[in-house]
Amino acid sequence: MRVKRLLAALALAAMLTGAPAAALAQSPPVSTRPDDLSGASRAQFVRVQKERDGIAAQLGLKRRTVDAIAVVALGQNSSFTDAELVVAVREQAQTARKLLDENERLATRVKALETPAIRDPALAALQRAETAIDEGRFVDAEREYAAIREVRWEQVDDGASAWEAAVSGQAVAARLAGDFDRAEDIRLTAGREAAARLRAAADRIELDQLMQAASERYQQGEVFGKRAALERAIALYRQDILPRLSETETPIDWAANQNNLGVVLLTQGRRLTGPESVAHLDEAVAVFRASLRVYSQAKTPSDWASTQNNLGIVLEIQGERLTGPDALARLDGSVTAFRAALQVYSEADTPFAWATTQNNLGNALLSLGERFAGPEAARRLEEAVAAYHAALRIYSEAEAPDQWSMTQSNLGIALRTQAERGAGPAAMTRLDEAVTAYRASLRVRSENETPAAWASTQNNLGVTLRYQGERLVGPNAIARLDEAVQAYRAALRVYSESETPADWAMTQNNLGIALLAQGERLAGTESIARLDEAIIAERAALRFYSEAETPASWASVQNNLGVALRTQGQRLAGAQGLSRFDEAIVAFRAALRVRTEAETPADWASTLNNLGVVLQTRGERLAGPDALVAFSEAAVAYRAALRVYSETETPSLWGITQNNLGVLLQSQAERLKGAEAVERLDEAATALRASLRVRSENDTPADWAMVQNNLGIMLRTKALLLIGSPSIQALDEAIAANRAALRVRTEVETPAAWAISQNNLGAVLETKGKRLDGAAGVACLEEAASAYRAALRVFSLPGSSANEEITRTNLQRAERLLAKRRAPHQDRNGKRASRAPLALQ
C-alpha cells in the first residue's frame, strides 16, 4: 500500500536580478489606523504585538510605523495566519527602513542645491515625509514625495538621479499604504515624464521604472498571496519590458529580465493546478533556457549558476506533477541543472548558494529515487541523503534556522524513503534517523510562527511513525500509530479544505492510512471504529483530488480507500461484508484507470495485488461458479503484479504477492477434487514457501507469522485429501506452522491475529484427532477445543461477528466429537459425517 508523501518545501533560490509587474482596478488605500480594524483582525493585531515591537526595535523604526504596516497588511489579506502576518509585516518594514535610509542620501543632494527657493521647500517636504512615515501616515508621505518630485531638477547637475529617488520614494510610500495600483501608476507615468522634464536617457529611466513596478507587483503577489498581482507582473515583463530589450543588442539586460519572468511564472505555476499551472511552468522552463543562451559559465558564472538553479527548481516541480517517462525526463533535467550550478558554487567561496543548491539537488534525487526500484532507487536515495548532509555542513540551527529546519525535514523524507525500500534492523535504523531529523526540524518550526512548515513536518513525521508502527508488533506498534495519528491531526489544525485544500487532502489521506493500520491491529468495536474513521478520511481527500486534474494522487487515494473498505469487509458478516468488498473493487479498478504497467509499474502492481486480495476474500464468501470466477480474476491480478515484483529487487512486495497467490490457490483447491485439487495445493505450497524465503521471524515477524499461518491452512487442506501416514505428516507440518505463527502472535500484543491462529491451530488438531484412534485422538480434540475457546476470548468481543460465528461452530463440533469419543458404548450406526472445521486467513 503506497502512501503519497508530502513534498518538503523546496528551497527556492530563485534570485531576482532586476524586477517583476501589470493593470488592476484602482482601489483606495487601506486604512493605517488600528481603530479601523474589525473584531477578528483587531484581535490578531493585538496577538502579534510582541513580534511587531521586535521588528521595530531590530530595524530602528517607530512603533507607529510598524503598527500602521500591520494594519495595512490585514487590510490586504484578512485570512493571514499570525505567522504569515508577521512575515508580511517584516517584509514591508524592511521596505520602510530602506526608504528612510534613502531619504538621508536624498537630503544630502537637496542640501547641495544653491538656490534657496528650490532647496528649502524640498528639505521641508522631505522632513514632513519622514515624520509622516514615523507616524504611519503613508498617504501623507506620498504627497510630500510628489512635491519633491516637482522640484526643477532639470536645472541641477545630476538632477535625474535625485528626481528618480523622489519618484521611488513616492511609489514606495504608496506601497506602504497598501495602494500597489497607485505605486505602479507613479512608476509608469514617471517613465513618460522623464523625456519632457529631463535632458537624460529617458528610455533608460522609463525601463528602470517599469522594472521596479514589475518587482513591486511580484512582491505584492509573493507576500500578500495576490494571484492577480503576479499575473500583472507577468504582463509587464511580456508586454512592456522585454519588447524594449534584445538578445543581440542588450543581451545581459534581456537575459536578466527573462530570468525574472521565469521566477514569476514559477511562483504562480506552483500555486496553481491543472492546465493553467502546466502552461506557466512550461513557459518558465522556456524563459530560463532563453536566459542561458546569453549567460555562460565562463563569462557570467554567477548569473549562469543562478539561472541553472532556477531551471532545476521548475523542472523538479514538473517532474513531481507528472508520471511515467515524462516525469523521469524532467527530474533528470533537474538533477543536471543543479549539478551544473554546483560547478560554479563552492562550499568555500559561496557557501550559502552552494548549500541551497545541494538541498535542491537532494529534492530532485529523492523524487527520482521514489520512481525507481532496486539498485537504481538505492543509488539515487543515497545521493539525496548525501546532498542533504552536505547542505547541513553550512546551515546551522543557530545561524540559519529556517534553512536548517527545512533541510532536516527533507533529510527525514529521504531516510524514510530508504527505509520503505529496505527491511530488518537497517530499515528500522533509517526510520529512527528520520524521526530524529523531523523532531530536530520541529525545534525551529512552530504552529504559531511557521504554521505551514510546521504542519508539513508534522505530516512527514506522521508518515514515518506509521511506518515504524507497521513494522512493530503489540503495544509498541499501537503506540507508534497513535503518535502518527496525533501528528496528522496536529497538521490538520493548520490545513483546511477551504484555504489549503491540497495539503489538507494529502494529510486526510495519510491520516486514513494510519487509522487503517490501527484498525488492522485491533479487534472488536475498536477496530471497526478506526476503519470507519479511515474510510471517512479517504473520502474526504477525494473531495479535492480528481481523475482529470490530479490523476496520480486521485489513484493513490482510491487505492487506499479500497484497502480500508476491504479490511472492514473482512470484519463484517453477511451482506455488510460483501457490500464493502464491492465498494473496494470499484475503488481499486478506478485507480487502475490511471496506474498502468508501462508508466507506473510499481503502483500498478500494488493496486493489482490489493484487487486480488479483495476478489479472493469475496470469493471465499461465495459458492459455486461465482466463487470460481472471483478466484480466477484474483489469480490474474496476482500473476500480473509478479511481472513487476522480483525476489531480488523488491523482495518485500514480491513476498507479499507470493503469499497472497498461495492463499488463493489453496482456496481454489478447497473447491476442487482429486488430482486437480492436489495440483493447486502443490502450487500453493511453492508460492508460500517462496514468500518465506524473504521473511524471517526476527526481521519481519508479523509478515513471517502471517505466511506461517497461511502455510498451516494449506497443509491442513492437503491432509484432508490424503489418507494414512501422508495425511498425518501433512497435519503435523500444519500444526508446526501454526505454532510457529503463535510464537509471534500473542493475545496481548496482536489479539486479532492471535485469535485467527488459535482457531486455525484448533482446526488442524481437530482434523488430526478425527484421524487418530484412542487416547491420542481424544488428546488432539481436547487441544483443539482449548484453542477454539482461546480464540473466542477475542472473537466474542463486539465487531468480530463473522469470525466468532466460524469459531463457535468449530468449537461446538469439536465438543460433540469429544463427547462421542468419551462414550464408547454409544451406538454409532447411521451417524452423519461431520464437516471439516473452518480456517481463517
Image (cartoon, rainbow, N blue to C red):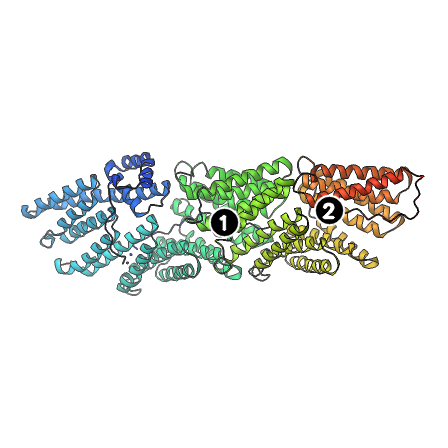
Q: Secondary structure at mark 1?
A: helix
Q: Secondary structure at mark 2?
A: loop
> Which residue in the protein does label 1 denote?
506
**At which x and y percent is residue 482?**
56, 38
Residue visible at 64% across and 37% down in the picture:
474
Which of the numbered marks, if any, corresponds to residue 375? none
Earlier sequence position, callout 1 versus callout 2: 1
129 left or right, relative to 668: left
In this view of the protein, which residue sits in the foreground, 441 or 738? 738
In this view of the protein, which residue sits in the foreground, 111 or 452? 452
Residue 416 visible in the current orientation? yes
For disc 2, the neighbor class at 10 Å (few under 14, some 14 to 19, many from 20) is some
The amino acid type found where label 2 is placed reads Leu
**At which x and y percent is residue 454?**
44, 41
For disc 1, the neighbor class at 10 Å (few under 14, some 14 to 19, many from 20) is many
Residue visible at 52% across and 55% down in the picture:
554
* Cα distance in 3D space between marks 1 and 2: 35 Å
Residue 647 visible in the current orientation? no
Quarter assignment of residue 190: bottom left
The amino acid type found where label 1 is placed reads Met
634 left or right, relative to 361: right
> Which residue in the protein does label 2 denote?
840
